[in-house]
Image (cartoon, rainbow, N blue to C red):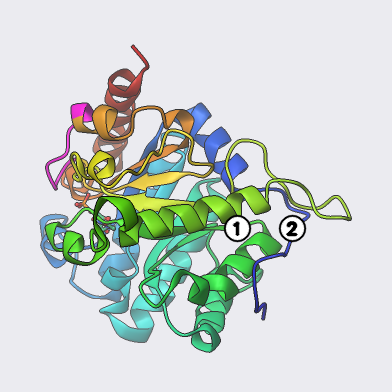
Amino acid sequence: MSAGPVTARSPRGGAGDRLVRAMAEHGPLCVGIDPHPGLLRDWGLADDADGARTFGLRVVEAAAGAAAVVKPQVALFERHGAAGLAALEQVLTAAADAGLELIADAKRGDIGSTMAAYADAWLREGSPLAADWVTLSPYLGFGSLDPALNLAAETGRGAFVLALTSNPEGASVQHVGGPEASVARGIVAAARELNERLREPGPEGAGGWELAGPCGLVIGATVGASLSRLGIDLADFPGPILAPGYGAQGATEEDLARVFAGTDRRLVVSSSRAILRHGPEVAALRREILGTNRRLAAGLAPS
Ligand SMILES: O=c1ccn([C@@H]2O[C@H](COP(=O)(O)O)[C@@H](O)[C@H]2O)c(=O)[nH]1
């Protein structure tokens, strides 16, 4: 397991570059795989691990070739215990086989030694739960994430670090410090510094990136004017930005265009329930995914 400051390099190339290229081909939508109890019921599925597996596999089938990215919400598989995690493994494998970029929304964060074990689970080559990206919580200190960020860089994977989340309660922690020195601003600065450090290939020519670094940010599409109030400029952030909050949480294409102006091809727009309520038919889900990608492309096009 990797430890210490992030220096590792992967011969596999950069996760950020792969993600940006996949979105250039298919659009910015990241389809959430959130098997909520109510959705399972609406889809005629049991609220158990089998139901979550069938649900996840249908979303993968609908997204294959229609979207660049899927994001399984780990908690909604975890709630079914060991069988739920086995279901998640099958969904992850199916998504990888379908050529989809995969973000495991696990929001892990702990002291460094435990963080190394989380990294091993979500980012190690050959791990049953390995994804292309994992979401991480930096609220034990950005440096506590080093084992995961190191393993990501070593294996050509990436991490999205929570900076300004889409829920209203997030501000009570993330805005602390005010316009000059907010917690969120510190996280954005640390992620920026890491991506800059990893920009050039290592001494043996491995690693490096061109379009986006491997350390992304989670910034809610619902944050309104918070970015400018906190002096955070994402236009030149050198990594991908995962934006939840579009759709079911109320953010619109206009909000996305306003909040994320200048982020261009690095913006990953996450939507779960607003897409998933169109199930259970794969064809209907696919139509909604394609339609959402079209609306996003039109709404985010530079004017
Ligand atoms: O700040 C955050 C971080 C993560 N999420 C997750 O994204 C989806 C959103 O689901 P919707 O149905 O599109 O609202 C969900 O898995 C959250 O856990 C977030 O919403 N906000």
Residue situated furthest right in the rendering: 204
Q: Position of residue 87 (x, y in %)?
A: 39, 71
| Numbered badge on residue 235 | none
Image coordinates of residue 114 in percent, x first then y, are 50, 87
Q: Nearer the viewer, residue 124 or 168?
A: 168
Please give the residue where the numbered disc 2 appears in the rendered image: 10
How many marks the image carries: the answer is: 2
Res. 95 visible in picture: no
Query: Helix, strand or loop at disc 2?
Result: loop
Q: Quadrant of the N terminus?
A: bottom right
In this view, the residue in front, 112 or 38, is 112
The residue sitting at 14% across, 47% down in the picture is 249
Q: Is residue 248 magenta?
A: yes
- Where does label 1 land, which residue? 157
What residue is rendered at 25% in x and 49% in y?
Answer: 272
Mark 2 lies within 8 Å of ligand 1 (Cβ measured): no
The percent position of residue 192, horizontal first and vertical second, equals: 52, 50
Residue type, mark 2 in image: Ser
Q: Amino acid at mark 1?
A: Arg
Identify the secondary structure beneath mark 1.
loop
Q: Is 87 colored magenta in this rendering?
A: no
**Dot 1 alpha-carbon crowd within 10 angstroms: few under 14, some 14 to 19, many 20 or more:** many
Q: Is residue 111 above or below residue 147?
A: below
Does residue 90 appear to the left or right of 99 in the view shown? left
User: Which span is picked out in magenta?
Assistant: 247-254
* Circle nearer the N terminus (2, 1): 2
Within 10 Å of the Cα at label 2, are there few (<14), some (14-19), or many (20+) other Cα atoms? many
Q: In the figure, is residue 147 to the left or right of 207?
A: left
